[in-house]
Amino acid sequence: MAAGARSTSAWLVVAGLVVSLVADVLIEFSFLAGLGTFLLAHVAYIAAFTARTRQPRLALALPFVLSVVSVLARLVP
């Protein structure tokens, strides 16, 4: 992070890193607590990367959607 960067997205990335650190510690004691905390960290990361623009860019989400559909198609019996 650049010196003096105080944008919302920068703070959200820092928050995600801190929450991930807490999740690393929690997962040693309770798997579900650590898993839930990692979920919160990922929510912070998603908020950070969508904070720059509010316009949806579906073309950028297409590879992720295709990969999720592919994985789910292999997992469903």
Image: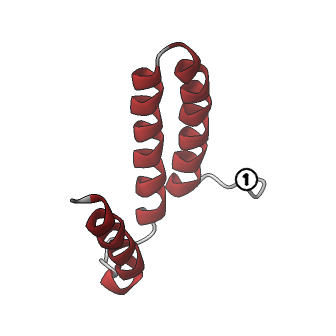
Q: Where 16 sits versus 72, above or below?
A: above
Tell me the quarter of the image containing the N terminus.
bottom right
Q: Of all residues shown, which one is farthest toward the bottom? A: 59
Q: Nearer the viewer, residue 29 or 13?
A: 29
Please state the horizontal and vertical placement of residue 53, each as a whole percent of the image: 40, 72
Q: Residues within 10 Å of mark 1 (few under 14, many from 20)?
A: few
Please state the horizontal and vertical placement of residue 54, each as a whole percent of the image: 32, 71
Q: Identify the residue under disc 1.
A: 4
Amino acid beneath label 1 = Gly
The tally of labels here is: 1
- In what element is the residue under mark 1? loop
Q: Which residue is drawn at 48% across and 52% down?
A: 45
Q: Which residue is drawn at 50% across and 53% down?
A: 8
Quadrant in the rendering for residue 25: top right
Q: Of all residues shown, which one is farthest toward the top? A: 29
Q: Where 56 sits versus 22, above or below?
A: below
Tell me the quarter of the image containing the C terminus.
bottom left
Please state the horizontal and vertical placement of residue 7, each as a whole percent of the image: 56, 56
Quadrant in the rendering for residue 66: bottom left
Q: Of all residues shown, which one is farthest toward the right? A: 3
Q: Which of 42 and 31 is in front in this view?
A: 31
Q: Of all residues shown, which one is farthest toward the left? A: 77
Q: Where 67 sits versus 31, above or below?
A: below
Q: Which residue is drawn at 45% across and 47% down?
A: 42
Task: Please state if 74 lies on the left or on the right of 45 as rendered.
Answer: left
